[in-house]
Amino acid sequence: MERLPQSSRLTWLAVAFGAGSCALLATVGADARWLAALGEEIVEKGSIPSGIPYAAAPSMDWVNVPVLGELTFHALQVIGGDKGLLLAQLVVATAALILLALGMRALGASDAASAAVLMVVFFAAAPSFIIVRAQLFSLVLFCGALLLLRAEARSPSWRIWLLVPLTALWANLHGAVLVGLSVAGAYLVFERFRREPIVAAGVLTSSTLALFLTPAWGDSGDYYLGVLRSEAALRGEGMWAPLSSHAPFDVLFVALAVPLVMFALRFGLQLWELACLAAFATFTIHAGRNSVWLICIVAAPAARGLSERFLPEFVPRRRAMLLCSWVPAALLIAGVLQPAPAGGASDLIRDRAAALAAGSPILADGLDAERLALEGHRVWIANPLDAFDLRDQRLYLDWLDAAPAGDRLLREGPVILVARGSPPDRRLARESSFRYAGGDSHAVIYVRKVLYAERQADVRRAVVFSATRSVLRGS
């Protein structure tokens, strides 16, 4: 049996630092609030809506699978608003780091090596740890699945059947369940099948069937195919964009991930782990959103490989640990106490856009489209984009890229809300049929000229309402 490290002080200090950094830096990104908006609709109506009720673009054929995720995001939003989502991100990120630390300890990595790798993992996959998105719970579930699979690789037992309920739960939360199932499949096919072929086949079959234990039942497959065949995925845009030398987080990931992969290979990976490493390295190159799964896969073996020569076991002094512990504690306290960072347009600008729209759909980009939907306003299209017809997805992405083909979308609504300085903002500033109707440091409103004068009274009422709401929030 491999010797386990006797000390874990540095490891837990690294976990605490990651938690404190997450608390201080976390923000709510696009691809988060739409779940809360749909969850609210489900609670109010008592049923799962057909399509996307807050969007004007046709979406009746969409299969809604992650209903549990939508209800969970709605509950978090009701309990604490954006702060509730940020606290959930803090809990999930901390839990993921703890699970990775337990996996390193189980492989016999030294305390210093485990701490160093945890820090590298946090910074290499920083967007996944500090930005609230739909994959919130997938991060901790993936790390839990890895811990289970590696424990089974060392000592096979009945616990492998836990993959089935884990897959069923995950399928109802987020589509990244396919990532977890692919890793589990690699273990079952390349490792467990040689020892217990009947058990391996049974677990793999049952886990695959568990993908369909959602409110959509047999139609769940259409949801997964829709995500993988979406226009954003086909184009490689947004979160589906490939790694780029122009993206700072991508450059940081490559700089930190390459040494970890080398240390993991130095330790020695089993066949199923090598298959996952090769597959996810390829996936990450083609879609940077997969980088977090790759870095989590190599974390534990990299810590063991690093500890064998460069960072052997040692026990830090208690006084030094006590002094250092003030840093993550201060970060955590500051992060929890600070107000939730505002993203996108201010309340005043969103209210003004809604008043100008007077019930007609608002054409908005990314973050603001989701915030408008959550506030009960109607938008033309928003996340989840894969819910809509490919033609409408294509039009919307063309418009976001300020491509001429996207100009056809301007006919769909009289009011447009875009991020200041974005490609659509620059293109609309030159569009003769629209005029500037207000903005702040983050967003700009454009309105079709023929409607602007007619709706000034509605705008004035919206300004008074927004100012009153701001005062009440402040009190």
Image: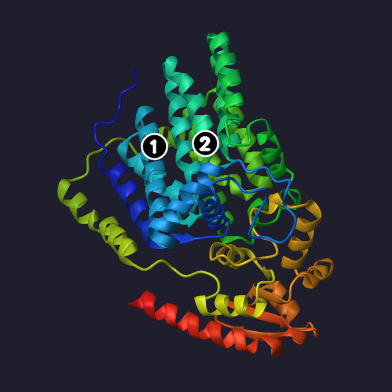
Locate residue 454 relative to residue 470 in the image: left or right: right
Which quadrant would residue 473 be assigned to in this image?
bottom left
Point out which mark residue 170 bears.
2
Q: Is residue 419 left or right of residue 308?
A: right
| Residue 202 spot, x, y in % from top left | 57, 15
Nearer the observer: mark 1 or 2; the answer is 2
Residue at screen point 57% across, 30% down: 213
Check disc 2 and give the amino acid type: Trp
Q: Amino acid at mark 1?
A: Leu
Judged from this view, the residue extending furthest toward the left is: 319
- The answer to whether residue 34 is above or below residue 47 is below
Residue 355, numbered circle: none
Residue at image point 49% right, 85% down: 464
Q: Is residue 383 visible?
A: yes
Query: Do residues under tags 1 and 2 come within 8 Å of each other at their CB atoms?
Result: no
For the C terminus, the image quarter is: bottom left
Q: Position of residue 134 (x, y in %)?
A: 54, 50
- Compared to residue 473, the image places residue 256 above or below, namely above
Judging depth in this view, the residue of 355 and 428 nearest the camera is 355
Residue topped by disc 1: 99
Residue 85 showing in the rendered view:
no
> Residue 3 at x, y = what percent?
31, 23
* Image vertical order of residue 454 relative to residue 283, above or below: below
Residue most extreme to the front: 45
Image coords of residue 444 (percent x, y): 63, 79
- Closest to the observer, 401 or 85: 85
| Disc on the earlier residue, 1 or 2 | 1
In the image: residue 430, left or right of residue 38 = right
The image quadrant of residue 272 is top right
